[in-house]
Every structure is written in structure tokens, then in C-alpha cells.
Image (spheres, rainbow, N blue to C red):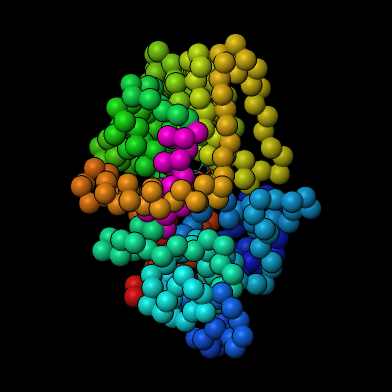
Amino acid sequence: MKVVLRNYVTGMVKESDLEVVAAEAVELKVPEGSKNAVVLKNLYLSCDPYMRSRMSKHEDASYNSDFVPTEVITGFGVSKVVDSTHANFEVGDLVWGTTGWEEYSLITEPQVLFKINHPDLPLSYYTGILGMPGFTAFVGFHEIALAKEGEYVFVSAAAGAVGQLVGQFAKLLGCYVVGSAGSDEKVELLKNKFGFDDAFNYKKEPDLTLALKRCFPEGIDIYFENVGGAMLEAVLNNMRLHGRIAACGMISQYNLLELEGIRNIVQIIPKRIRMEGFVIGDHFAKYRKFEEIAAQHIKEGNITYMEDIAEGLENAPSALIGLFEGKNVGKQVVVVSRQ
Ligand code: NAP
């Protein structure tokens, strides 16, 4: 079984844009003469918002390659090495990195593939807290936003893979942190499970600027940006002098045919705001240090982590598309095989 893109997508993505089809029989061996290659048995797949961009055709260069219709889609996942001609990987190794949305994948010259150093922790965590989203939360909060103890921090899409961790890193540093999310259930989790100081359901707020004023009477020092659009405008109205915006994602824009403008962007000048976009792929050289920090936090019980698990490749399309409808509560994972 494998998941393929039916055709390039314009506008709102639908489950029917993806198809689960029978996969060709694969030999579980690296082909003769193929160097630096691994055959992976895929265990857990990561559903990530950036995959939406790969479903559209880009005439100009995008930082991620476009998927090819009718071919298997790729993304981050956790896998077991079943054959290898790569010096860094041996048969039986557990790894995370780029793989196919199928049961077995042949990966030649892997660009992103890490051996898992903490196989005692739940392996699926390497699609989230111990993998790309966790590292994104950490780098964005500490290195891009340059957060300091006591600062006022706002996180949007706060109950998702990245957001739940940004909020907890902020609490560990001694910040005041507020999150927004799209359901009352998620708001409850933010306040009562993830330890946010406050949270609100952005879908129920008639005026986002006023909602943020209520939560931050003294203004926001750091905005961890996950959604863009109207929320970014409301945040700019509430930023403090010398505030920082770590522009991680803008999911509200990913399915639009025409992107929204930010009408009050001029405010970054008098408020001396620094807004910086970042792409986590640029930081992977530092991943190992993060893996140790995150593993220690998990083992010491300093961080709570929540996953939303879909069972089986047949449920992978709905799991991925659900991200754009806010269906996931926590990190969205697809289980292909548990061992
Ligand atoms: P996630 O938060 O686990 O899932 C996406 C969430 O976004 C949904 O659950 C939904 O939550 C919210 N959402 C969906 N459509 C929305 C809309 N139109 N307006 C507002 N909110 C919407 O995803 P994630 O993996 O943690 O990613 C969060 C953000 O980080 C994304 O923008 C992603 O692209 C970005 N990211 C960037 C990097 C990087 O390298 N820069 C790396 C990883 C992730 P609600 O129910 O709360 O609406």
C-alpha cells in the first residue's frame, strides 16, 4: 500500500486529492551497485502542514520539491533499517528522517536521516517532540525569538505539534504564555494539561485584537507565529516595543488562492519589532544537542506531550488533510507498523 497525490491541488485541499493504492512488490534489499542507500521499513509517519505546499505545482523554485502526481508522497517518519549500503546505518537501526508514505522505502543518498539515540522512549515521539516539530519549537523560541525569562509570549495553533512544545519551553524559561486554538477542548488542554497561563478559542472571539488585549494588558514580547492572516494583524496591534516575531508558519494562508495582506505591518517600525522567518532544515546540524535536551525533559517529566494517532496507511489521507480543518488534537501521527 502507498499514498499518492492524484493531481496538483489548487485552493482547499481535500482528502480525495490523495489516494491509497497498491504498491509494487519490493525486494527488501538495496539494488546491486547502489551506494549510500537504505531500505526502510516504515513504522510511523508524520503529518506536517508544509506538505500542503508540496501538493501544488510551483513554477518558481520552492524550498521543498513538489510531489509528483501518481507517485508516492514523502515526508518525515520513523523507520527501521532492513538493508543498507550506507556507512552510517546498519540493519536493525531505528532511524527518523525523510521516507515514503508506504510500507517499505528505498532511500538513496538520504539528506535527512538520523539514527535514533533514545529507542527506550516511544518511537513515535521522533515524529514530534524528539523530531522535526520539537526541534522547530526549540530553535524558533530560543534562537529566533531569543526569549528571556519573564517575557510575555503568545503562541498560535498552540495545541498542535509545535505549539504545545513552544508553550512548555516558555514555561520552563519562566515566561508568561498564552495560546490560541480552534476549539474549547484544545483551550482546556492548553490551560490544564500543557500549563499555559491562559488560552482562548480564536473562532469564538469577535475581535482578536481585544482578545489579545485581555490576555496581555501590558502587551506581547514574543509572538510564535504559526497561522498568519488576521491573527498576525491582531498581534501587531498588541506587540510591545522591541518585540520579536518568530515566523514559523502561516497555515491560514496555505489553502488560499489569493494570499491575505497584513494591513498594519507598518507598526513594526515605531515598535522596533524584529520579525524573522526560519526553516528548520537549515538547523539540522545542531539536532543532536536538542535530542539530548528533549529526551532529558521527557525522562524527568518536565514536558507533557500529546499525539493524535491514526491507524494504518488507509487512514493517512484523512489524517493529513485533517490538519487544515483543525481535527488533530496534538501531534498528528500515522501508524504504519508498530515494529
Ligand atoms: P499542528 O499545529 O499540529 O496542526 C495544524 C493546526 O493549525 C490545526 O490543528 C489547526 O488548529 C490550525 N489551523 C489549521 N487551519 C487553520 C487556519 N485556516 N487558521 C488558523 N489555524 C489553522 O501543526 P504543526 O506541525 O504544529 O505546525 C504548526 C505551524 O508550524 C504550521 O504553520 C507549520 O507550517 C509550521 N512549521 C514550520 C516549520 C519551519 O521549519 N518553519 C517546521 C514545522 C512546522 P486549530 O484547531 O487551533 O485551528
Q: Is residue 136 magenta?
A: yes
The residue under the point 43% across, 35% down is 141
Q: Split into 4 quadrants, where in the image is the C terminus?
A: bottom left
Residue 30, percent from left and from top? 54, 83
Q: Position of residue 303 (x, y in %)?
A: 27, 44
Q: Nearer the viewer, residue 92 or 188?
A: 92
In this view, 58 is above or below 183: below
The residue located at (51%, 25%) in the rendering is 244
Residue 200 lies in magenta, yes or no? no
Relative height, residue 23 to residue 116 (above, below):
below
- Residue furthest to the right in view is 59
Instruction: Identify the residue shown where x is 30% and y is 61%.
Output: 118
Which range is magenta? 127-144
Residue farthest to the left, as pictured:
300
Q: Is residue 224 left or right of residue 10?
A: left
Residue at 43% over, 42% down: 137
State the image quarter where residue 90 is shown.
Answer: bottom left
Drawn side of residue 55 relative to residue 302, left or right: right
Along the viewing direction, whichever of 95 and 44 lies nearer the viewer: 95
Q: Is residue 156 visible?
A: no
Give residue 191's position: percent from left, percent from top: 29, 34
